[in-house]
C-alpha cells in the first residue's frame, strides 16, 4: 500500500477509506500512530456529526411539510434550516413573477418587513434567474453584478454568497449540470458562511434543499389557485343562488298574475309578495295617468289586506320616481312628505323604482318599499335591483293584462257584429214572406184568402219570435223543449214552402224523399230551426247553385234524417271543431252559431248528429232521432 494515503487531508479520510476494502482499512488504521489515530478519529467523529446535523436539518424540513399547514410557515422553516446548515449569517428567498419579469423577496432574513424587488438580470440573484445557473462567490465586492447599495442601506456587510436557482418541481434537476433547459420559479441566496467560503458540498446541499423549496413554492401556488377557484366558486354559487331566487320570484309573479281574476286582485297580491320578500313595513304601487293616480298600498300594521285609493291630482306618492324615471334609495331625511304623511310611524329607508313601459316608451307609475326605525334596516343596492326586477315584471303583467282586455273587447265586438249580421240574415226570409203576403192582402178582397194570408203572416211572426228566443236561450245556456206529437209527412208539407223560398233564391233545388211519414215526439219549432240551419249551411257551400236533398227513413225505434248537398265540402282544418261556437269558413254573413245551435237542439232531444264530407263533392249530415213514442 502506498504511503500517499497518509498525505490525504484528514477531512477526506472518510471518503478515501470508503474506496478501500475492509482488510485494507484495518491495515491502514493499524499502521497509524496512536496520537494521529486519535486525531483522525476525532475529526471523523466531527465530520459524522456534521453530516448528521445536515441529515437532521433535511429531516426537519421534511417534517415541516407534514406539520405546517401554511406555506409561509413552511418556507420560513426551510430558510432557517438553510441558514443553519450553510453556517451562514442570513438567507433570502426570491420568487419569480413571470408576468412582470421580476423577482420579489418572499422571505428576507435580517431585512424585517422590507420587500426587495429585482428585475430579471438585475443584481446577482437576477442574473442567476436569467442565466439559470448557480454561482458561488468568495468575494462579492469583486463581482460586477453585486449591488453595494443594499449593504449601504442596511448596514450589513456581505462577504461571500451562494446563489442558486429554484426550478419547477416538475423539471427540477437531479444534478447541477444541464440546468439551462429547466423552468426557474425562484432564487435562493445565502450570505456569509461563518467559517470561510462556501464549498462544493454546500452547493450540493443547497441544490437538494432548493428541491424542497420548489415543492413548497408550487404547493403554495397550487393552494393559492385552489383558494382562488374556491372563492370564484363561492361567488358563482352566491350569484347562482341569487339568480335562482330571482327566477323563483319571477315564477311567483307569473303565478300570481295567472291566478288573479282582476287587475286590482293581481296588484294587491304582487305588492303583498314584495312586502314579504323585503320584510318591509309597507309597499306602495302607484299607477298614474293624465288626470289622476291610483295608489295601491299594503301596510300590514295598518291593514292586513292590500287597499287602493284614487288621488285626483298629479302630486302623488312616487311622483319623483315617475318624473325622473330612475330608481333610488332614500334615507329618513330625504323621503317625500306625501309618503311620510301616510305613515303613523317613522320611516328610516325607502327603496323605489319607476314602472317604465319600454314598449310604450312611457312611465306608468312607481313601486316603493319602506323600512321603519323600529326595524333598523336599510335597503341595499342589491335589493334595489331585485325591486327593479319585480317592477319590470309588474309592468309586463299590467301591459299583458291590458292587451288581453283589449283583445277580449275587440273579440266581443267582432262576435256581436258577426252574430247580429247572421241574425239579420236569418230574419230576412220571414220578413220577406210577411211583406209579400201583406201586399197580396192589400190587393185581394176575398175574405177566405185574406184569412189564409193572415194565418201565414202570423206563423212567420211566430217563427221570428221563436228564432229570437232560441238565440237568447243559446246565449244564456238555457234549455227548454216543447215536445208535441209531430206527423213527419205534414211537418214537411208545411215546411216545404219556407225551405224552398230560402233555397230557390240562391239557385238551389230542394229534393224531398220522405219514406217515413209517421209520428215522432219532438219540439216542432226547434226541429224546423235545425233543418233550416243545415239548409242555409248547405246553401253557403254552393255559391253557384246545386241541390239540397232531405231523406227520412225509419230505423227501429229511431228516425234517421239525411241532409245532402252538392257543395264544396267542409274544409279539413275545421272538421274537428265544426260544432263549436263561432266556427265558420268563407261566409260573409255567417254567425258561426248555426251548427252549434243544431247540435244543442239535437242533444236536447237525446239524439245524435254526424257528417260525411268530400271536398268539391258535397257533405251529408245524419241526425238519428228517437221516435219518443214510449
Image (cartoon, helix red, strand yellow):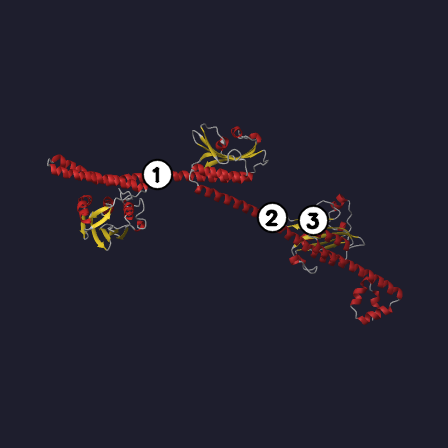
Residue visible at 45% across and 41% down in the picture: 257
Q: Secondary structure at mark 3?
A: strand
Residue 484: x and y in percent read 23, 46
Q: Which mark is residue 231?
A: 2
Q: Residues within 10 Å of mark 3 (few under 14, many from 20)?
A: some
Does residue 68 lie above or below 288 as drawn?
below
Q: Is residue 30 left or right of residue 533?
A: right
Which residue in the protein does label 1 denote? 410
Q: Say which label, 2 or 3, has the lower sequence index.
A: 3
Mark 2–mark 3 distance (CA, rounded to whole Å): 23 Å
Does residue 138 lie above or below 467 as drawn?
below
Residue 51: x and y in percent read 78, 60
Residue 583: x and y in percent read 31, 46
Q: Nearer the viewer, mark 2 or mark 1?
A: 1
Q: Which mark is residue 148?
A: none
Circles 2, 3 touching at the beta carbon (< 8 Å): no
Which residue in the protein does label 3 denote? 106
Q: Secondary structure at mark 1?
A: helix
Q: Quadrant of residue 175?
A: bottom right
Residue visible at 89% across and 64% down in the picture: 35
Which residue occupies the foreground of this view, 107 or 411? 411
Amino acid at each position: 500500500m502506498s504511503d500517499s494515503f497518509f498525505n490525504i487531508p484528514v477531512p477526506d479520510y472518510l471518503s478515501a477509506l470508503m474506496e478501500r476494502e475492509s482488510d485494507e482499512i484495518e491495515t491502514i488504521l493499524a499502521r497509524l500512530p496512536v496520537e494521529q489515530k486519535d486525531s483522525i478519529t476525532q475529526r471523523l467523529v466531527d465530520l459524522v456529526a456534521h453530516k448528521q446535523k445536515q441529515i437532521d436539518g433535511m429531516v426537519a424540513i421534511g417534517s415541516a411539510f407534514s406539520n405546517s399547514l401554511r406555506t409561509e410557515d413552511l418556507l420560513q422553516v426551510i430558510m432557517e434550516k438553510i441558514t443553519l446548515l450553510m453556517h451562514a449569517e442570513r438567507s433570502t428567498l426570491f420568487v419569480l413573477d413571470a408576468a412582470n419579469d421580476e423577482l420579489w423577496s418572499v422571505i428576507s432574513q435580517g431585512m424585517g418587513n422590507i420587500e426587495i424587488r429585482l428585475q430579471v438580470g438585475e443584481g446577482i440573484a437576477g442574473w442567476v434567474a436569467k442565466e439559470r445557473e448557480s454561482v458561488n462567490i468568495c468575494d462579492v465586492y469583486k463581482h460586477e453584478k453585486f449591488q453595494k447599495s443594499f449593504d449601504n442601506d442596511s448596514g450589513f456587510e456581505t462577504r461571500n454568497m451562494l446563489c442558486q436557482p429554484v426550478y419547477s418541481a416538475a423539471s427540477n434537476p437531479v444534478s447541477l449540470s444541464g440546468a439551462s433547459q429547466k423552468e426557474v420559479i425562484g432564487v435562493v441566496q445565502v450570505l456569509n458562511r461563518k467559517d470561510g467560503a462556501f464549498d462544493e458540498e454546500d452547493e450540493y446541499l443547497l441544490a437538494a434543499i432548493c428541491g424542497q423549496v420548489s415543492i413548497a413554492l408550487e404547493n403554495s401556488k397550487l393552494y393559492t389557485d385552489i383558494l382562488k377557484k374556491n372563492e370564484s366558486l363561492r361567488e358563482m354559487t352566491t350569484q347562482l343562488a341569487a339568480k335562482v331566487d330571482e327566477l323563483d320570484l319571477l315564477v311567483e309573479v307569473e303565478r300570481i298574475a295567472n291566478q288573479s281574476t282582476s287587475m286590482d286582485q293581481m296588484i294587491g297580491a304582487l305588492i303583498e309578495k314584495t312586502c314579504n320578500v323585503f320584510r318591509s313595513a309597507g309597499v306602495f304601487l302607484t299607477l298614474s295617468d293624465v288626470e289622476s293616480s291610483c295608489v295601491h298600498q299594503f301596510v300590514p300594521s295598518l291593514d292586513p289586506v292590500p287597499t287602493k285609493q284614487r288621488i285626483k291630482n298629479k302630486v302623488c306618492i312616487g311622483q319623483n320616481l315617475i318624473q325622473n324615471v330612475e330608481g333610488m334609495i332614500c334615507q329618513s331625511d330625504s323621503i317625500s312628505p306625501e309618503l311620510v304623511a301616510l305613515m303613523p310611524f317613522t320611516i328610516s329607508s325607502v327603496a323605489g323604482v319607476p314602472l317604465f313601459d319600454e314598449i310604450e316608451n312611457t312611465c306608468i307609475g312607481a313601486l316603493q318599499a319602506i323600512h321603519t326605525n323600529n326595524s333598523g334596516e336599510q335597503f341595499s343596492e342589491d335589493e334595489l335591483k331585485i325591486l327593479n326586477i319585480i317592477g319590470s315584471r309588474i309592468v309586463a303583467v299590467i301591459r299583458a293584462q291590458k292587451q288581453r282586455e283589449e283583445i277580449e273587447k275587440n273579440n266581443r265586438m267582432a262576435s256581436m257584429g258577426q252574430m247580429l249580421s247572421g241574425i239579420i240574415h236569418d230574419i230576412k226570409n220571414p220578413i220577406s214572406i210577411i211583406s209579400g203576403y201583406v201586399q197580396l192582402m192589400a190587393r185581394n178582397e176575398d175574405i177566405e184568402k185574406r184569412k189564409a194570408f193572415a194565418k201565414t203572416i202570423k206563423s212567420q211572426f211566430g217563427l221570428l219570435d221563436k228564432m229570437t228566443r232560441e238565440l237568447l236561450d243559446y246565449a244564456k245556456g238555457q234549455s227548454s223543449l216543447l215536445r208535441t206529437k209531430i206527423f213527419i209527412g205534414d211537418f214537411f208539407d208545411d215546411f216545404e214552402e219556407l225551405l224552398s223560398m230560402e233555397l230557390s233564391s240562391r239557385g238551389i233545388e230542394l229534393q224531398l224523399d220522405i219514406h217515413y211519414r209517421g209520428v215522432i215526439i219532438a219540439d216542432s219549432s226547434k226541429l224546423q230551426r235545425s233543418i233550416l240551419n243545415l239548409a242555409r249551411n248547405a246553401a253557403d257551400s254552393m255559391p253557384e247553385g246545386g241541390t239540397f236533398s232531405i231523406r227520412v227513413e225509419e230505423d227501429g225505434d229511431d228516425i234517421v234524417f239525411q241532409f245532402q248537398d252538392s257543395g264544396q265540402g267542409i274544409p279539413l282544418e275545421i272538421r274537428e271543431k265544426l260544432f263549436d261556437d263561432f266556427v265558420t269558413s268563407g261566409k260573409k254573413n255567417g254567425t258561426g252559431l248555426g251548427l252549434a245551435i243544431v247540435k244543442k237542439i239535437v242533444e236536447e232531444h237525446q239524439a245524435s248528429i254526424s257528417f260525411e264530407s268530400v271536398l268539391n263533392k258535397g257533405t251529408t249530415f245524419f241526425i238519428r232521432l228517437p221516435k219518443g213514442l214510449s
